[in-house]
Amino acid sequence: MEKLEVVGGKKLSGVLKISGSKNASLPILAASLLSKKKIKLINLPQVKDIKTMLTLLESLGSRVKKVGKKTIIDNINQKKTEANYNIVRLMRGSFLVLGPLLAKFGKAKVSSPGGCSIGVRPIDIHLNALTKLGVNIKIVDGYVIAKAPQGLKGAKIRFPKISVGATENLIIAASLAKGTTILENCAIEPEIKDLTNFLFKIGCNIKWISKRSIRIVGVSEINEATYSVMFDRIEAGTYLIAAAVTEGNLKIKNVNPNILRSEIKILRKIGSKVRIKKNEIHIIGNKNIRSVNIKTAPWPGLATDLQAQIMVLLCRGNKKSTIQENIFENRFMHVSELNRMGAKISIVGNRALIKGNTKFAPAQLMATDLRASVSLILAALSAKGKSVINRIYHLDRGYENIEKKLKKVGAQIRRLN
Ligand code: EPZ
């Protein structure tokens, strides 16, 4: 099993280019199934979750080819409608193929993704909304078997709770439904806006009609198109925090700073100097980190995917801080490992109480999920001495070339087999 060795205590300094967004690429790749032609995508990140999605598309009959910077999805012979457990179990985002398969073929059999280390993660919102588009759903042997023999029919649907995945699945499905669909109380994360920009580009009739409502008029055909996926705002946020936690000096390029405004506000509050240019954020970390109380929330609030990383920073704060996790009930798996490094964090319900003034000590560590893994790297970068992070396959699911990028800005980090 691969591990990462980090010798911490060095200030990160230099320039980093941010990769394409994993969480925008996944729904866009799923939506490419709507097409019977070729879709060309640019800026897909080279990470394991994207490889898993491409393997899933191939298992459904798509042909995938990489030509230079473009990934070409050729769906001319894409006819299969079953997404197998062996692939879906590797990544929850696989469930996003349900919407496009149903829209294109009127049927789909997709393994139910189950929970994971950050929470129970049910799929009821996806399934209830799809039934409103005229889909019959049964769950048999762990598979969602969905049928709409007459095709999908547009409907007005209000999501009972904001869900990124359910919003994506429904927007994609409604794009080929007969008639008009109005979706209300949608998630409006930047990745969803990227998906709707992509759908617009391939010929879907789609329009945001208010902050959280979208109108989709089903079309009968999808055009060929080339689309460049947005930058990874979570990767960008992670490196900004890495600079803050090591009192470093980093320029983050290939970003839209406006998309990171909640995170930049917090970084400024804790005392980092943050300067913004059109496609660049420059951060200078400070020695004395001020404590703050924060909570995660759907966009435009603070991303839950940055909660673990910010927790590392707040451990170094001058007083007590709290983090309220409002999206995933169990997303505190990193806490016990951070405490083993000297942090003083306790959990009460969905709140982490962080004592502050922690000097992280190096340790042998075990990663539990993608963002927990990276938070351990951040703590290890701050700890003087050698830490080893085990079970890093989680990290490879979502961070492109992380060691290479961190090394480039002065981190001492290497992969051990
Ligand atoms: C997406 O997951 C992201 N994944 C997650 O990123 C991210 O943490 C999450 O959105 C929240 O921003 C991808 O984009 C591939 P949700 P998703 O549906 O769509 C509950 C990362 O680290 N819910 O918005 O699965 C759910 O349990 C990952 O990159 C239901 O109750 O998240 C949660 O409490 C991890 N029923 C809340 O809604 C449902 O049917 C929000 O989940 C669906 C969700």
Image (cartoon, grey):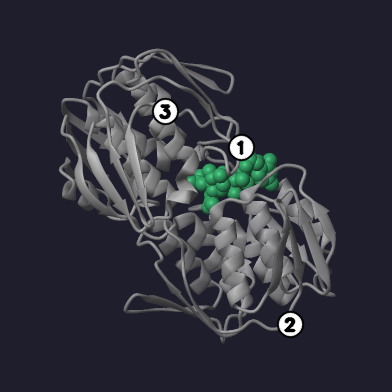
Marks 3/1: CA–CA distance: 33 Å
Residue 218: x and y in percent read 76, 74
Residue drawn at x 76%, y 48% as measured from the top left: 159
Q: CA distance from mark 1 to mark 2?
A: 37 Å
The residue under label 1 is 120
Above-or-below relation of 257 to 349? below
N-terminal of the pair, mark 3 or mark 1, is 1
Answer few, some or many: residues within 10 Å of disc 1's Cα (few below 14, many 20 plus, some between 14 and 19): few
Relative to residue 209, is residue 242 drawn left or right?
Answer: left
The front one of 359 and 212 is 212
Q: Which residue is mark 2?
A: 220
Residue at 46% x, 65% y: name it.
Answer: 229
Q: Which kind of residue does numbered mark 3 sit on?
A: Lys
Q: Is residue 120 visible?
A: yes
Foreground residue, 373 or 61? 373
CA gap, disc 3 and disc 2: 50 Å
